[in-house]
Image (spheres, helix red, strand yellow):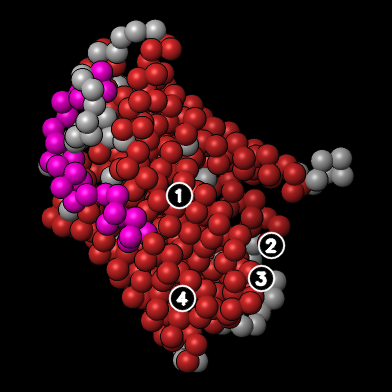
Amino acid sequence: MIFFGIIGDEVGRRLAILCTGSLVVLGSIASACCMRAEAFPLAYQLFLCRLVLGFGIGGEYPLSAAMASERSSAATRGRVTAGIFSMQGLGAVVAAVLPLILLACGSPLQATWRVLLAVAVLPSAFALYLRFSLKESDSFKNAKSKRHGNTIDRASKFAKTIWKLILPLLGTSLSWMFMDITFYGTGEFKHVVANELFPGGEGVQKVMNDSWFAFVVSLVGLPGYICACIFIDKLGRWRLQVLGFVMMILFYLVMGICSQFSTNAYLNLVIFAITFFWTNFGPNTTTFIIPSEIFPIDVKSTCHGFSASMGKVGAIIGAYCFPTLQATMGLAGVMYVCAGVAALGLASTLIFLKRKLLDGAADASLDGYSTEDSDVELKPSA
Protein backbone atom coordinates (compact mmCIF):
# COMPACT_ATOMS: atom_id res chain seq x y z
CA MET A 1 0.00 0.00 0.00
CA ILE A 2 2.73 2.45 0.97
CA PHE A 3 5.04 1.28 -1.84
CA PHE A 4 2.48 1.70 -4.61
CA GLY A 5 1.19 4.87 -2.98
CA ILE A 6 4.65 6.41 -3.37
CA ILE A 7 4.97 5.03 -6.91
CA GLY A 8 1.59 6.53 -7.76
CA ASP A 9 2.70 9.97 -6.58
CA GLU A 10 6.19 9.91 -8.07
CA VAL A 11 5.74 8.00 -11.34
CA GLY A 12 2.03 8.17 -12.06
CA ARG A 13 -1.28 6.56 -11.16
CA ARG A 14 -1.76 4.80 -14.50
CA LEU A 15 1.51 2.87 -14.54
CA ALA A 16 1.19 1.97 -10.88
CA ILE A 17 -2.37 0.67 -11.20
CA LEU A 18 -1.39 -1.41 -14.24
CA CYS A 19 1.31 -3.00 -12.09
CA THR A 20 -1.09 -3.75 -9.24
CA GLY A 21 -3.67 -5.17 -11.63
CA SER A 22 -1.04 -7.42 -13.20
CA LEU A 23 0.01 -8.71 -9.78
CA VAL A 24 -3.60 -9.48 -8.89
CA VAL A 25 -4.10 -11.48 -12.10
CA LEU A 26 -0.77 -13.27 -11.72
CA GLY A 27 -1.40 -14.10 -8.06
CA SER A 28 -4.91 -15.37 -8.80
CA ILE A 29 -3.76 -17.64 -11.63
CA ALA A 30 -0.83 -18.98 -9.63
CA SER A 31 -3.04 -19.66 -6.59
CA ALA A 32 -5.44 -21.75 -8.64
CA CYS A 33 -2.58 -23.72 -10.21
CA CYS A 34 -0.88 -24.77 -6.97
CA MET A 35 -0.25 -28.51 -6.84
CA ARG A 36 0.58 -30.92 -4.04
CA ALA A 37 4.28 -31.79 -3.95
CA GLU A 38 6.55 -33.21 -1.27
CA ALA A 39 9.48 -30.98 -2.21
CA PHE A 40 7.43 -27.79 -1.99
CA PRO A 41 4.30 -28.22 0.17
CA LEU A 42 0.99 -26.84 -1.02
CA ALA A 43 0.74 -24.48 1.95
CA TYR A 44 4.04 -22.81 1.01
CA GLN A 45 2.96 -22.47 -2.60
CA LEU A 46 -0.30 -20.84 -1.60
CA PHE A 47 1.51 -18.53 0.80
CA LEU A 48 3.79 -17.20 -1.94
CA CYS A 49 0.97 -16.89 -4.48
CA ARG A 50 -1.31 -15.10 -2.05
CA LEU A 51 1.59 -12.85 -1.07
CA VAL A 52 1.84 -11.69 -4.69
CA LEU A 53 -1.93 -11.30 -4.85
CA GLY A 54 -2.04 -9.39 -1.57
CA PHE A 55 0.76 -7.06 -2.64
CA GLY A 56 -1.25 -6.17 -5.73
CA ILE A 57 -4.54 -5.77 -3.88
CA GLY A 58 -2.85 -3.58 -1.29
CA GLY A 59 -1.68 -1.21 -4.00
CA GLU A 60 -5.20 -0.98 -5.37
CA TYR A 61 -6.41 0.94 -2.32
CA PRO A 62 -4.50 4.23 -2.69
CA LEU A 63 -4.42 4.19 -6.48
CA SER A 64 -8.09 3.49 -7.13
CA ALA A 65 -9.12 6.06 -4.52
CA ALA A 66 -6.79 8.74 -5.89
CA MET A 67 -7.83 8.16 -9.50
CA ALA A 68 -11.52 8.15 -8.65
CA SER A 69 -11.35 11.39 -6.68
CA GLU A 70 -9.17 13.19 -9.23
CA ARG A 71 -11.31 12.23 -12.21
CA SER A 72 -14.65 13.21 -10.64
CA SER A 73 -16.34 16.53 -10.07
CA ALA A 74 -17.11 17.78 -6.58
CA ALA A 75 -20.79 16.98 -7.16
CA THR A 76 -20.20 13.29 -7.94
CA ARG A 77 -16.88 12.50 -6.27
CA GLY A 78 -18.33 11.02 -3.09
CA ARG A 79 -20.76 8.73 -4.91
CA VAL A 80 -18.18 7.64 -7.48
CA THR A 81 -15.50 6.78 -4.92
CA ALA A 82 -18.02 5.10 -2.62
CA GLY A 83 -19.39 3.17 -5.59
CA ILE A 84 -15.95 1.85 -6.47
CA PHE A 85 -15.35 0.81 -2.88
CA SER A 86 -18.77 -0.84 -2.62
CA MET A 87 -17.69 -3.49 -5.12
CA GLN A 88 -15.98 -5.28 -2.24
CA GLY A 89 -19.41 -5.73 -0.68
CA LEU A 90 -20.72 -7.33 -3.85
CA GLY A 91 -17.61 -9.48 -3.98
CA ALA A 92 -18.23 -10.68 -0.42
CA VAL A 93 -21.73 -11.83 -1.36
CA VAL A 94 -20.49 -13.64 -4.48
CA ALA A 95 -17.66 -15.24 -2.49
CA ALA A 96 -20.22 -16.68 -0.07
CA VAL A 97 -22.65 -17.83 -2.77
CA LEU A 98 -20.16 -19.64 -5.02
CA PRO A 99 -19.20 -22.39 -2.54
CA LEU A 100 -22.88 -22.96 -1.80
CA ILE A 101 -23.58 -23.48 -5.50
CA LEU A 102 -20.53 -25.68 -6.08
CA LEU A 103 -21.16 -27.88 -3.06
CA ALA A 104 -24.87 -28.15 -3.85
CA CYS A 105 -23.87 -29.43 -7.29
CA GLY A 106 -21.76 -32.15 -5.70
CA SER A 107 -18.33 -30.61 -6.14
CA PRO A 108 -15.76 -32.19 -3.77
CA LEU A 109 -13.99 -29.91 -1.33
CA GLN A 110 -10.62 -30.45 -3.03
CA ALA A 111 -12.01 -29.09 -6.29
CA THR A 112 -14.17 -26.38 -4.73
CA TRP A 113 -11.36 -24.34 -3.20
CA ARG A 114 -9.41 -24.43 -6.45
CA VAL A 115 -12.40 -23.26 -8.50
CA LEU A 116 -13.04 -20.44 -6.04
CA LEU A 117 -9.47 -19.20 -6.45
CA ALA A 118 -9.64 -19.53 -10.24
CA VAL A 119 -12.90 -17.56 -10.55
CA ALA A 120 -11.12 -14.45 -9.27
CA VAL A 121 -9.04 -14.40 -12.45
CA LEU A 122 -12.02 -13.40 -14.62
CA PRO A 123 -12.95 -10.00 -13.12
CA SER A 124 -9.29 -9.22 -12.41
CA ALA A 125 -8.24 -9.84 -16.01
CA PHE A 126 -11.19 -7.83 -17.37
CA ALA A 127 -10.37 -4.90 -15.09
CA LEU A 128 -6.71 -5.03 -16.16
CA TYR A 129 -7.75 -4.94 -19.83
CA LEU A 130 -9.88 -1.83 -19.25
CA ARG A 131 -7.06 -0.07 -17.42
CA PHE A 132 -4.88 0.10 -20.50
CA SER A 133 -7.25 2.77 -21.84
CA LEU A 134 -6.90 4.93 -18.71
CA LYS A 135 -5.09 8.25 -18.83
CA GLU A 136 -3.69 10.43 -16.08
CA SER A 137 -6.13 13.04 -14.79
CA ASP A 138 -5.55 16.68 -15.71
CA SER A 139 -5.30 17.58 -12.02
CA PHE A 140 -2.45 15.11 -11.48
CA LYS A 141 -0.62 16.26 -14.62
CA ASN A 142 -0.98 19.89 -13.53
CA ALA A 143 0.40 19.10 -10.09
CA LYS A 144 3.27 17.10 -11.57
CA SER A 145 4.20 19.93 -13.93
CA LYS A 146 4.74 22.24 -10.94
CA ARG A 147 7.43 20.05 -9.43
CA HIS A 148 10.93 21.46 -9.42
CA GLY A 149 14.32 20.68 -7.95
CA ASN A 150 16.26 17.45 -7.83
CA THR A 151 15.26 14.22 -6.12
CA ILE A 152 16.80 15.23 -2.79
CA ASP A 153 14.98 18.58 -2.79
CA ARG A 154 11.67 16.90 -3.58
CA ALA A 155 12.24 14.27 -0.89
CA SER A 156 12.94 17.01 1.65
CA LYS A 157 9.81 18.89 0.58
CA PHE A 158 7.85 15.65 0.77
CA ALA A 159 9.03 14.94 4.33
CA LYS A 160 8.17 18.47 5.47
CA THR A 161 4.74 18.17 3.89
CA ILE A 162 4.00 14.89 5.64
CA TRP A 163 5.02 16.44 8.96
CA LYS A 164 2.65 19.37 8.43
CA LEU A 165 -0.12 16.89 7.65
CA ILE A 166 0.60 14.73 10.69
CA LEU A 167 -2.63 15.45 12.59
CA PRO A 168 -5.09 14.66 9.79
CA LEU A 169 -2.85 11.73 8.79
CA LEU A 170 -3.18 10.42 12.34
CA GLY A 171 -6.93 10.87 12.05
CA THR A 172 -7.25 8.91 8.81
CA SER A 173 -4.79 6.23 9.96
CA LEU A 174 -6.07 5.62 13.48
CA SER A 175 -9.76 5.65 12.54
CA TRP A 176 -9.02 3.16 9.73
CA MET A 177 -6.96 0.97 12.07
CA PHE A 178 -9.62 0.83 14.79
CA MET A 179 -12.34 0.18 12.23
CA ASP A 180 -10.39 -2.71 10.66
CA ILE A 181 -9.68 -4.28 14.04
CA THR A 182 -13.42 -4.86 14.40
CA PHE A 183 -14.22 -5.40 10.70
CA TYR A 184 -11.57 -8.01 9.98
CA GLY A 185 -11.48 -9.29 13.54
CA THR A 186 -15.12 -10.32 13.38
CA GLY A 187 -15.00 -11.04 9.66
CA GLU A 188 -12.02 -13.38 9.68
CA PHE A 189 -13.48 -15.62 12.35
CA LYS A 190 -17.05 -15.69 11.06
CA HIS A 191 -16.75 -19.48 11.12
CA VAL A 192 -16.09 -19.34 14.87
CA VAL A 193 -19.14 -17.16 15.41
CA ALA A 194 -21.18 -19.40 13.12
CA ASN A 195 -20.10 -22.49 15.04
CA GLU A 196 -21.06 -20.89 18.35
CA LEU A 197 -24.46 -19.74 17.10
CA PHE A 198 -25.14 -22.84 14.96
CA PRO A 199 -23.05 -25.70 16.37
CA GLY A 200 -22.67 -29.05 14.64
CA GLY A 201 -21.72 -30.33 11.22
CA GLU A 202 -18.50 -31.68 9.77
CA GLY A 203 -16.77 -31.70 6.39
CA VAL A 204 -18.99 -30.47 3.57
CA GLN A 205 -21.85 -29.67 5.95
CA LYS A 206 -19.63 -27.44 8.07
CA VAL A 207 -18.43 -25.56 5.00
CA MET A 208 -22.05 -25.16 3.91
CA ASN A 209 -23.01 -23.80 7.34
CA ASP A 210 -20.10 -21.34 7.32
CA SER A 211 -20.95 -20.23 3.77
CA TRP A 212 -24.62 -19.70 4.61
CA PHE A 213 -23.62 -17.67 7.65
CA ALA A 214 -21.18 -15.57 5.59
CA PHE A 215 -23.83 -15.10 2.90
CA VAL A 216 -26.42 -13.75 5.35
CA VAL A 217 -23.91 -11.43 7.02
CA SER A 218 -22.63 -10.15 3.65
CA LEU A 219 -26.14 -9.74 2.27
CA VAL A 220 -27.24 -7.64 5.24
CA GLY A 221 -24.01 -5.64 5.04
CA LEU A 222 -24.37 -4.93 1.31
CA PRO A 223 -27.13 -2.29 1.70
CA GLY A 224 -24.69 -0.44 3.95
CA TYR A 225 -22.47 0.22 0.94
CA ILE A 226 -25.49 1.28 -1.11
CA CYS A 227 -26.69 3.66 1.61
CA ALA A 228 -23.19 5.12 1.83
CA CYS A 229 -23.29 5.88 -1.90
CA ILE A 230 -26.67 7.57 -1.50
CA PHE A 231 -25.98 9.59 1.65
CA ILE A 232 -22.25 10.32 1.44
CA ASP A 233 -22.85 13.75 -0.08
CA LYS A 234 -26.07 14.51 1.79
CA LEU A 235 -24.73 13.78 5.27
CA GLY A 236 -21.08 14.53 4.63
CA ARG A 237 -18.01 12.41 5.30
CA TRP A 238 -17.48 13.50 8.90
CA ARG A 239 -21.06 12.98 10.05
CA LEU A 240 -21.31 9.64 8.26
CA GLN A 241 -18.13 8.37 9.93
CA VAL A 242 -19.24 9.58 13.36
CA LEU A 243 -22.72 8.09 12.88
CA GLY A 244 -21.23 4.78 11.78
CA PHE A 245 -18.94 4.48 14.78
CA VAL A 246 -21.75 5.41 17.19
CA MET A 247 -24.07 2.77 15.73
CA MET A 248 -21.27 0.19 15.71
CA ILE A 249 -20.74 0.80 19.43
CA LEU A 250 -24.48 0.44 20.08
CA PHE A 251 -24.96 -2.79 18.12
CA TYR A 252 -21.77 -4.40 19.40
CA LEU A 253 -23.08 -3.80 22.91
CA VAL A 254 -26.50 -5.18 21.94
CA MET A 255 -24.84 -8.19 20.32
CA GLY A 256 -22.78 -8.79 23.45
CA ILE A 257 -25.84 -8.65 25.69
CA CYS A 258 -27.92 -10.88 23.40
CA SER A 259 -25.19 -13.49 22.95
CA GLN A 260 -24.72 -13.53 26.72
CA PHE A 261 -28.36 -13.80 27.75
CA SER A 262 -30.29 -14.96 24.66
CA THR A 263 -30.29 -18.45 23.17
CA ASN A 264 -32.07 -17.35 20.00
CA ALA A 265 -29.38 -18.00 17.39
CA TYR A 266 -31.31 -16.32 14.57
CA LEU A 267 -31.76 -13.11 16.57
CA ASN A 268 -28.04 -13.06 17.31
CA LEU A 269 -27.26 -13.67 13.65
CA VAL A 270 -29.38 -10.69 12.56
CA ILE A 271 -27.79 -8.38 15.14
CA PHE A 272 -24.31 -9.57 14.19
CA ALA A 273 -25.09 -8.87 10.53
CA ILE A 274 -26.41 -5.39 11.39
CA THR A 275 -23.01 -4.49 12.86
CA PHE A 276 -21.59 -4.98 9.36
CA PHE A 277 -24.35 -2.83 7.86
CA TRP A 278 -23.34 0.13 10.04
CA THR A 279 -19.65 -0.51 9.48
CA ASN A 280 -20.16 -0.42 5.72
CA PHE A 281 -22.57 2.52 5.87
CA GLY A 282 -20.08 4.43 7.99
CA PRO A 283 -16.34 4.13 8.57
CA ASN A 284 -15.60 1.21 6.24
CA THR A 285 -16.53 3.51 3.35
CA THR A 286 -15.52 6.90 4.75
CA THR A 287 -12.03 5.81 5.83
CA PHE A 288 -11.43 4.95 2.16
CA ILE A 289 -12.84 8.22 0.82
CA ILE A 290 -11.52 10.82 3.27
CA PRO A 291 -7.77 10.35 2.56
CA SER A 292 -8.46 10.65 -1.16
CA GLU A 293 -9.91 14.14 -0.65
CA ILE A 294 -8.09 15.97 2.13
CA PHE A 295 -4.45 15.51 1.10
CA PRO A 296 -2.61 17.47 -1.64
CA ILE A 297 -2.43 15.73 -4.99
CA ASP A 298 1.29 15.02 -5.06
CA VAL A 299 1.22 13.19 -1.72
CA LYS A 300 -2.35 11.91 -1.97
CA SER A 301 -1.74 8.26 -2.80
CA THR A 302 1.18 8.07 -0.36
CA CYS A 303 -0.94 9.39 2.51
CA HIS A 304 -3.82 7.17 1.46
CA GLY A 305 -1.49 4.17 1.24
CA PHE A 306 -0.13 4.85 4.72
CA SER A 307 -3.65 5.20 6.13
CA ALA A 308 -4.74 1.97 4.45
CA SER A 309 -1.64 0.15 5.69
CA MET A 310 -2.50 1.16 9.25
CA GLY A 311 -5.92 -0.30 8.58
CA LYS A 312 -4.30 -3.60 7.69
CA VAL A 313 -2.25 -3.44 10.89
CA GLY A 314 -5.62 -3.31 12.61
CA ALA A 315 -6.81 -6.23 10.48
CA ILE A 316 -3.85 -8.31 11.64
CA ILE A 317 -4.51 -7.39 15.27
CA GLY A 318 -8.18 -8.30 14.99
CA ALA A 319 -7.70 -11.52 13.04
CA TYR A 320 -4.94 -12.71 15.37
CA CYS A 321 -6.41 -11.66 18.73
CA PHE A 322 -10.15 -12.18 18.36
CA PRO A 323 -10.14 -16.01 18.16
CA THR A 324 -8.05 -16.08 21.34
CA LEU A 325 -10.38 -13.59 23.01
CA GLN A 326 -13.36 -15.67 21.95
CA ALA A 327 -11.81 -18.79 23.48
CA THR A 328 -11.19 -17.04 26.81
CA MET A 329 -14.02 -14.49 27.03
CA GLY A 330 -16.69 -15.98 24.81
CA LEU A 331 -18.55 -14.28 21.97
CA ALA A 332 -20.11 -11.72 24.32
CA GLY A 333 -16.69 -10.63 25.54
CA VAL A 334 -15.45 -10.18 21.98
CA MET A 335 -18.44 -7.97 21.18
CA TYR A 336 -17.77 -5.79 24.22
CA VAL A 337 -14.15 -5.43 23.12
CA CYS A 338 -15.39 -4.44 19.64
CA ALA A 339 -17.56 -1.74 21.20
CA GLY A 340 -14.52 -0.36 23.01
CA VAL A 341 -12.40 -0.40 19.85
CA ALA A 342 -15.17 1.35 17.90
CA ALA A 343 -15.23 4.00 20.65
CA LEU A 344 -11.51 4.57 20.03
CA GLY A 345 -12.28 4.97 16.33
CA LEU A 346 -14.93 7.56 17.19
CA ALA A 347 -12.48 9.39 19.47
CA SER A 348 -9.76 9.50 16.80
CA THR A 349 -12.28 10.97 14.36
CA LEU A 350 -13.45 13.65 16.77
CA ILE A 351 -9.93 14.60 17.89
CA PHE A 352 -7.93 14.55 14.65
CA LEU A 353 -10.44 15.01 11.81
CA LYS A 354 -12.20 18.35 11.80
CA ARG A 355 -15.63 18.54 10.24
CA LYS A 356 -14.85 21.83 8.49
CA LEU A 357 -11.81 20.30 6.78
CA LEU A 358 -13.69 17.24 5.55
CA ASP A 359 -16.70 19.21 4.34
CA GLY A 360 -14.40 21.65 2.55
CA ALA A 361 -12.55 18.82 0.85
CA ALA A 362 -15.82 17.34 -0.38
CA ASP A 363 -16.78 20.65 -2.00
CA ALA A 364 -13.35 21.44 -3.46
CA SER A 365 -12.81 21.65 -7.19
CA LEU A 366 -10.03 19.77 -8.98
CA ASP A 367 -7.65 22.67 -9.23
CA GLY A 368 -4.41 20.71 -9.28
CA TYR A 369 -3.35 22.14 -5.92
CA SER A 370 -0.09 20.58 -4.81
CA THR A 371 2.63 21.03 -2.22
CA GLU A 372 4.69 22.95 -4.77
CA ASP A 373 2.28 25.90 -4.75
CA SER A 374 3.41 27.37 -1.45
CA ASP A 375 4.40 26.45 2.08
CA VAL A 376 1.54 24.06 2.36
CA GLU A 377 -1.16 24.50 4.92
CA LEU A 378 -3.64 21.71 4.66
CA LYS A 379 -6.57 22.71 2.54
CA PRO A 380 -8.99 20.77 0.40
CA SER A 381 -7.64 19.11 -2.67
CA ALA A 382 -9.07 16.22 -4.60
User: How much space separates mark 3 and mark 2, taking CA atoms?
Assistant: 8 Å
Which residue is at a point 28% across and 45% down the rendered structure image? 290
Percent position of residue 262, x then y? 46, 91
Q: Which residue is denoted by mark 1 in the rendering?
A: 311
From what the image shows, is residue 49 above or below residue 370? below
Residue 306's quadrant in the figure?
A: top left
Q: Which residue is denoted by mark 3 in the rendering?
A: 204
Q: Which residue is denoted by mark 2 in the rendering?
A: 108
Which residue is at a point 44% across and 86% down the rendered structure image? 258
- Mark 3 is on which residue type? Val
- Asked whether 332 or 11 is in front, the reply is 332
User: Which segment is the magenta one?
Assistant: 345-372
Percent position of residue 185, x then y? 52, 62
Q: Nearer the viewer, mark 4 or mark 3?
A: 4
Q: In this orientation, does residue 246 appear?
A: yes
Percent position of residue 249, x then y? 36, 71
Task: Give the mark nearest the N terminus, 2 or 1.
Answer: 2
- Mark 2 is on which residue type? Pro
From what the image shows, is residue 96 above or below residue 12? below
Which residue is at a point 26% across and 30% down the rendered structure image? 296
- The reply to whether the C-beta atoms of the residues labelled 3 and 2 are less than 8 Å apart is no
- Specify the label residue 139 is tagged with: none
Residue 145's quadrant in the figure?
A: top left
- Mark 1 is on which residue type? Gly
